[in-house]
Image: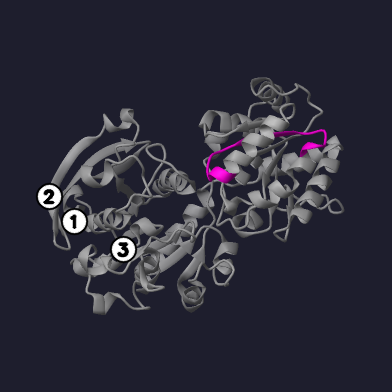
């Protein structure tokens, strides 16, 4: 079976979120399980120079995008045994940002249509094209314009970001007939065009990244205006949980040593008895920051240490910066991102806070558990599917959780977790169970292969 995996980002080349991790790790596991897979993504100028210099030119042509005639080149690099192809056009991808440019509609329409244009250059005839998020949402739409018939899987990693643009782009940029494609069964969404809706309407099968999120997006609260469409398409929706590369997050033998090293590095009191509560996140409303802020000063009044790592919305950055100045003794507010420090925080902490408003899957809670750092999460999306709440009567569970999006519930369960922390026997038993959780990609890859087979035989 031949699979072309289409993504707007992939680690280690470019990563802004969980999609970057998935686009690296899932193809590796699929190849292990016998799939002939190639990954294709834009050739951004922001890709690390050491990778850009290793790429080899494969070929180029000119393609039409509405009235425009555009250069499209392809470069190639094999990384960790996977063939990566990079679509090259300096006008579109030599930018200061990956996303958020004024012409993202044109940039990712070019990328989506370009997938078909370069198949002859890379000499690959896929049975399955596996698209990811809105950036490749037009790939299934453009399929009808080419004389090939791969089956198309469309994976939604985060429904909030939908690629919505003005309706004037449908003919001028996308080169699509307005009468045929500007309607509710095609691309029309709130009198605009939605790349995400294109991916949903024109794909053979749709996946999201956890089983709970599949059900949540059928509701008005989490459906981002598309809940009716998801209810209609229940038959072609499936939730497949993301995994992590467990080899990348191998714990050291002594967690205590790593905790003391972390405290020293961040200028905190070196004391094994003080619990470290950490957050590694994009500073965004989605991540439950509002209910953390509601209670943070109460949390910091306790005998705990609080570590934050991440960047995002300025209002959150400013808040945490000021709180860090006020509580210098027991906080470390790191308003940047660093992969090495992230791993040190995951491993050196005791409790990992992730009270998201919504969370399609989440990888951080899995990484934390792998290091024996217990997650405290809200029971939503992938968090609900991966963290089993501690039950003191049955002595089961791998972390702590609460149901409603409420600061009151958050502080209540946090206080309970800190109480359990003082009972080292109980805490260590939970840690052992958390570390044993199999969050590798192996099982998920099997589910994707089963889905690919279904696409090939059912449509």
Percent across and percent down for residue 55 are 25, 34
Report the Cα–Cα distance between label 1 and label 3.
14 Å
- Residue 302: in magenta span: yes
Q: In screen coordinates, is 385 left or right of 99?
A: right
Q: Which residues are magenta?
A: 300-315
Circle 1 Cα neighbour tier, 10 Å, few/some/many (<14 / 14–19 / ≥20): some
Which residue is tagged 2?
Answer: 61
- The kind of secondary structure element at disc 2 is strand
User: Is the C-beta separation of discs 2 and 1 under 8 Å?
Assistant: yes
- The kind of secondary structure element at disc 1 is helix
User: Is the C-beta separation of discs 3 and 2 under 8 Å?
Assistant: no
**What residue appears at the point 12 percent right and 52 percent down from the top-left corner?**
62
- The kind of secondary structure element at disc 3 is loop
Report the Cα–Cα distance between label 2 and label 1.
8 Å
**What residue appears at the point 52 percent right and 41 percent down from the top-left corner?**
245
Which residue is tagged 3?
Answer: 138
Among the 4 quarters of the image, the one containing residue 219 = bottom right
Residue 371 in view here: no
Front residue of 275/434: it is 275
Kindly identify which numbered label has been placed on residue 117. Answer: 1
Percent across and percent down for residue 293 are 69, 47
Among the 4 quarters of the image, the one containing residue 323 = top right
In this picture, is 334 found above or below 29? above
């Amino acid at each position: 079976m031949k699979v072309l995996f289409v993504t707007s980002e992939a680690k280690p080349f470019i990563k802004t979120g969980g999609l970057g991790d998935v686009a690296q790790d899932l193809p590796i596991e699929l190849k292990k399980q016998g799939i002939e897979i190639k990954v294709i993504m834009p050739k951004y100028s922001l890709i690390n120079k050491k990778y850009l210099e290793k790429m080899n030119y494969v070929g180029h042509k000119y393609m039409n995008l509405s009235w425009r005639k555009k250069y499209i080149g392809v470069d190639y690099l094999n990384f960790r045994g996977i063939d990566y192809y990079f679509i090259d056009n300096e006008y579109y991808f030599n930018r200061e940002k990956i996303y958020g440019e004024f012409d993202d509609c044109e940039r990712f329409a070019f990328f989506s249509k370009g997938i078909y244009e370069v198949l002859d250059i890379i000499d690959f005839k896929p049975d399955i094209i596996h698209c990811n998020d809105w950036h490749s949402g037009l790939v299934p739409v453009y399929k009808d314009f080419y004389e090939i018939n791969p089956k198309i899987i469309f994976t939604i990693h985060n429904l909030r970001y939908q690629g919505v643009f003005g309706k004037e782009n449908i003919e001028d940029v996308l080169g699509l007939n307005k009468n045929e494609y500007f309607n509710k069964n095609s691309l029309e969404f709130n009198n605009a065009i939605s790349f995400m809706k294109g991916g949903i309407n024109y794909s053979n099968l749709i996946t999201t990244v956890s089983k709970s999120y599949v059900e949540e997006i059928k509701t008005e609260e989490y459906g981002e205006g598309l809940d009716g469409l998801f209810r209609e398409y229940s038959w072609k929706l499936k939730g497949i949980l993301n995994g992590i590369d467990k080899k990348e997050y191998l714990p050291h033998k002594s967690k205590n040593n790593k905790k003391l090293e972390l405290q020293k590095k961040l200028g905190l009191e070196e004391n094994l008895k003080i619990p470290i509560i950490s957050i590694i996140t994009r500073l965004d409303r989605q991540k439950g920051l509002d209910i953390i802020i509601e209670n943070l000063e109460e949390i910091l009044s306790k005998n705990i240490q609080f570590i934050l790592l991440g960047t995002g919305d300025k209002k959150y950055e400013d808040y945490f910066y000021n709180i860090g100045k006020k509580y210098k003794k027991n906080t470390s507010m790191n308003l940047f991102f660093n992969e090495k420090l992230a791993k040190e925080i995951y491993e050196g902490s005791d409790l990992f806070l992730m009270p998201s408003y919504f969370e399609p899957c989440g990888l951080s809670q899995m990484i934390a558990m792998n290091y024996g750092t217990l997650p405290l999460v809200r029971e939503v999306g992938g968090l609900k599917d991966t963290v089993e709440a501690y039950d003191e009567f049955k002595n089961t569970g791998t972390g702590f959780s609460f149901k409603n999006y409420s600061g009151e519930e958050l502080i209540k369960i946090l206080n309970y977790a800190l109480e359990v922390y003082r009972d080292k026997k109980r805490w260590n038993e939970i840690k052992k169970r958390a570390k044993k959780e199999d969050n590798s990609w192996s099982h998920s890859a099997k589910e994707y292969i089963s889905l690919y087979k279904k696409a090939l035989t059912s449509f």
